[in-house]
Image (spheres, helix red, strand yellow):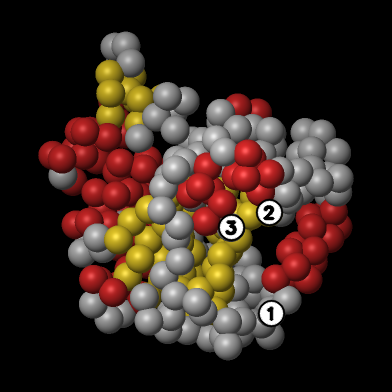
Amino acid sequence: MSVRAEGLLAKNWFTPQAIDAAGDESDWCPHPRVQARVTTRRGDLSPPPWQGFNLGLNCEDDRQRVLAAREQVSAAIGAHSPVWLTQVHGNRVITAPSEEAQTVPEADGAVTRETGRPCAVLTADCLPVLIARNDGSAVGALHAGWRGLLDGVLENGVAALAGTTADIHAWLGPAICCRCYQVDDTVREAFVRHSQSAASGFSADGPGHWRMDLGVLARQRLLAAGVTSISGGDLCTHCRADLFYSFRHEGVTGRFATIIWLLG
């Protein structure tokens, strides 16, 4: 990791470009209107075990601490408040509601064409995926745990952006890596039933157990959906638990956010 990238990663949030620099990949910048940030756990709002900057309301943390962290995110973005979803490990992708909406949508992805209306997903090992049209007309944020990935949350997100898939760019955020993520036969078999090529996303790890590569499987799904411009996917939440929340590493823990929005 370069000194420059390490310095950026030390901040409380950073850009996809900084993450890509850490992994020596090309910068992700689909269009000047497209803005994106990933928060870290570094902060002082929540005590252990959520230590730092927890943005998840379903983690047993104090609600007021979480809301204070969310307010800081909104202030830092300088736009409307992000669309905070009730995520259920499903495949539903919605159009971001207005800021005046009284209910929190139950979905695992949101897209928008509205200026200054951030879409956000919360994760702590699952894969956050940002998508954007290269003309800067629409963006989205998707939450891809293995269940949502299997059931088509990425494909639904791509379809929700409309237009031709060749015009869509995708970025894979920090998630648990294959070295740290063990699943059983049931999970692997479900993916392979959907597509034989999914077998390349698993490596044997003892009888009935496999190491699963969310990044490989996500890239396969996006490519099959017609998205060919894909980057990111190099930082592991479990390996970098100093920066990110990791459920597999800690059990009771917080959630960090991956956020995208459009400038005017």
Tell me the element at label 2.
Answer: strand
Residue found farthest to the top: 206
Name the mark on residue 102. none
Which is more toward the observer, 109 or 30?
30
Residue that appears at 29% across and 43% down: 217
Which is more toward the observer, 181 or 130?
130
Is 76 situated above or below 205?
below
* Residues tagged 1 and 2 counted as in contact (Cβ below 8 A): no
Read off the residue under disc 1.
80
> In this rendering, would 153 be left or right of 41?
left
Q: Position of residue 131 (x, y in %)?
A: 41, 66
Mark 2 residue type = Trp
Q: CA distance from mark 1 to mark 2?
A: 18 Å
Q: Position of residue 185 (x, y in %)?
A: 28, 25
- Number of marks in the rendered image: 3
Mark 1 against mark 2, which lies toward the viewer? 2
Name the mark on residue 13. 2
> In this rendering, would 87 be left or right of 80?
left
Which is more toward the observer, 12 or 220?
12
Q: Position of residue 189 (x, y in %)?
A: 22, 33
Residue 136, by quadrant, is bottom left
Q: Residues within 10 Å of mark 2 (few under 14, many from 20)?
A: many
* Residues tagged 3 and 2 counted as in contact (Cβ below 8 A): no
Name the mark on residue 15. 3
Q: CA distance from mark 3 to mark 1?
A: 19 Å
Q: Is residue 134 visible?
A: yes
Q: CA distance from mark 3 to mark 2?
A: 7 Å
Mark 3 residue type = Thr
Residue that appears at 58% across and 88% down: 264
Q: Is residue 125 visible?
A: no
Residue found farthest to the left: 196
